[in-house]
Amino acid sequence: MKTIIALLLLLPALLVGQNAKKSRIDSNRSSLLSINVNPLPSGRSTGLPISTDLHIFHHAKTALPGQPLFLEGAFPANSVVNVALNDGVYAPLAIGNQQLNSINTAIPETFPIGIYAISVASGGRKSQTVYINRAEGYYFSSPDVYAGAPMELVGTNLLIPGFKPTIRFISQSGGKSLYATFVPAKSFDKRLNFIAPKGLILGVSYNVYVSNGMGGTVGETLVDDQLKAVASGRDVWTIGSAWGRAYAPFFTNIYNVKTDPRLRLKAAGDGVVNDQPAIQSAINLAAASPNGGVVYLPGGSTYKIIIAPGDGNRVGIYLRSKVVLVGDGPGLTTITFGHSGTKGIDLFRRDANATTSGVANLSISNKDVTGSGWYTGVFRGSEMFWKNVKFDMLKADFAAFWHCNKVAVVGCEFNQTLNSLIHGPLSMDGSTYVIAKNNKFTFCAGPGIDKTRKVIWEANTLIKDVGLGRINNQTYHIMTVDFVQKALIHDNSFLMQNGAVPAFAPFWKNDLETLIAEDPDAVDQDQGSVSSATPTTLTDITKKWGSTFAMSPTVAIISGKGMGQTRDIASRTATTLTLSQAWSVTPDVTSKYAIFNWTIKDVSITANRLHNMQRGFTFYFVAGKNVNIENNTLINSGAIDLNPSQFQRTGFIQFSPIYDFRVAGNYCNSLTDPRNGTFIGVHTGQNMAGAALGPLAINTQIIGNMVIAGIPNLTVQIDDFYPNGFLNYHFPPSAGYVTGASAALGTSFYGNTGLNLDNGFSTNSGTDQMSLKANNFFNTTNKQNDNLRSIGTSVRTSTLN
């Protein structure tokens, strides 16, 4: 009978599939416009003086009327929370639960949609105002701009239904404002497309201000990124970025490698003769031209590449500045390498000082079936693209775009077999202004964008080919996003072909996260107690630090005075950290701190589709901030798993927290998966005895999601076994856990739906100041298991239904 009920409940979704999910999400969004636009109730004015002791550190950036709201910062336990529409007349909010430095409240159902100005008041003074639903711009698709250039701005709250955004340019030296033209196509709340305004002055740097159309002047904010005006041009290779205009002059100088009379060496293109010398000679000649050039490989030909004798670097083709290598299209123009009896390292190489080069419209085929150490190539420098390239890699290592500034891979196809070094088809480590769109990847181990900044990864198809087998008897990740900051991962498909990954023990050999961010090596991490502090320093006299870091770490105050603050570290001595920005609240001897690198920060993962991937999105031992996971579809693909952790390392404690994550509008369905379940939520981890050092998760919003489990519920296998449903609990050590510690602080569950669950919510005493509102469960045995792992029940929960 239970199965029949479940199928009846699921019937609408089965009939309309994704449309049912889309309708549900659109219904949540449309409520933005269906709220009655009533004036706010009269209340206190904005006239309270600002206190230097009252601060809000963590809050929602986006909220609907009626949505729970959690605030964390520096304020006493009897504080009042005030709200105003667009910083107008303030009114107090009802308090659901509060303690020192944290408050649970909610936006009233009757409020109109708009920009909510929030402040905390106590003793006749108030905090600085923070804003909800205000547009924030993080970065552009290009640091270069010219009049009429098509551009993209990535951020949050950029587009609100019923309102028109504005993008305003103003020179850094002042002058009149210039307004860009908004382009609705492919714009949404995380990305605006626009046409740069006329009147930009060559060589001038511009600040850009953005508004989503709400709030008047209060609603306009300065974009984190800046733009510099360059000479007008045209993105001749349609790579989707303004810096593509730099390639236009190359077309005045085209070298046909088979016929050009300027070339002393001509390519045969017969697949027999070594064409490496002829192609390299043409590239060198084009690079020497003042305007660069295009090296053209005519179609209907196969160009064989063998490493030049005596080349100690063992490189096939050196790409030079101001050169594009181009054919007539995949299948028409083919480059081959890895021939029997030849050895190499890189098919392509481009040095760190190179600029403005590319590869387009051809096929590349590896003939080495042994996997003898060939790389596709290492590309460094600035302004590098691949467009419409089909690459049959066999076992060759990745195409490595490392530490490139301005790189695009567009419309390409990568087919890779089993690579024993676990080097997938593409690596973009350390690159900035990255565009990867409309590509197809088939592989055993997937691509990675680790340590990248300002990324748009969109409309790609990633296919795990199970038929290729496992590497070292292990199944590896689909896509890695370690230490990524400022990225949009949008509208991608993650698929499995040639069967499903077989279940085998031990389950951690199935390391098949579709998207994973992790810090397994705890790079630069440390933790301790504050001995003293000034507005711009922190001192711990017990330390003996070196002066350098491997990366660019942050210090967080994780308990005591000033908890919730994070600051980038500018420098350090043996005992003292110097900050890049002053503390809002200076810590004292009651404060504990943690040092870490952000594993993921200012990233949006939206509208992606996962089918039969076994494991979904995993944030494992991760330090993360301001991450949006929204409107994704996971069919038989495991969980959306937030797993910050406190971990005992040799000589130090790894403390990796997550702050301000938003998980909204996702659809997770494991109904037909015979091996795995599904969940959405937070499970903080701790492998050391004693109390948690501080909250591992602060202000997580889990809103408008749907979870459909199989019958019976199967545990979700990640690094352990986890229940289905919605999770918000602490995973303690086997002994010595101190109950009542705030491991997951201020998680809000609002408007979620669950079907076929043994337990709707799984919580325990690590759960503090959780809000539950408007969540619905069907065919579910228990709404909440509030003593998971048998360590006690949650504390200070606000049930607002």
Image (cartoon, rainbow, N blue to C red):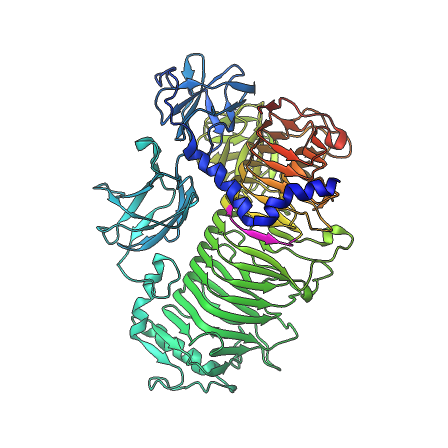
Q: Quadrant of the N terminus?
A: top right
Q: Is residue 314 left or right of residue 671?
A: left
Q: Quadrant of residue 213?
A: top left
Q: Is residue 530 visible?
A: yes
x, y (%) of residue 366?
A: 57, 75
- The range drawn in magenta is 605-613
Q: Is 606 contained in the magenta span?
A: yes
Q: Position of residue 27 (x, y in %)?
A: 49, 38
Q: Is residue 346 above or below residue 512?
A: below
User: Which residue is the extreme one toward the top?
Assistant: 123
Q: Which percent across, then down, holds residue 89?
A: 35, 20
Residue nearest the observer in this picture, 19 or 628: 19
Q: Is residue 188 magenta?
A: no
The image position of residue 408, as x and y in percent, is: 44, 60
Indicate whether 192 appears above or below 442. Answer: above
The quarter of the image holding the C terminus is top right
Q: Foreground: 86 or 394?
A: 86
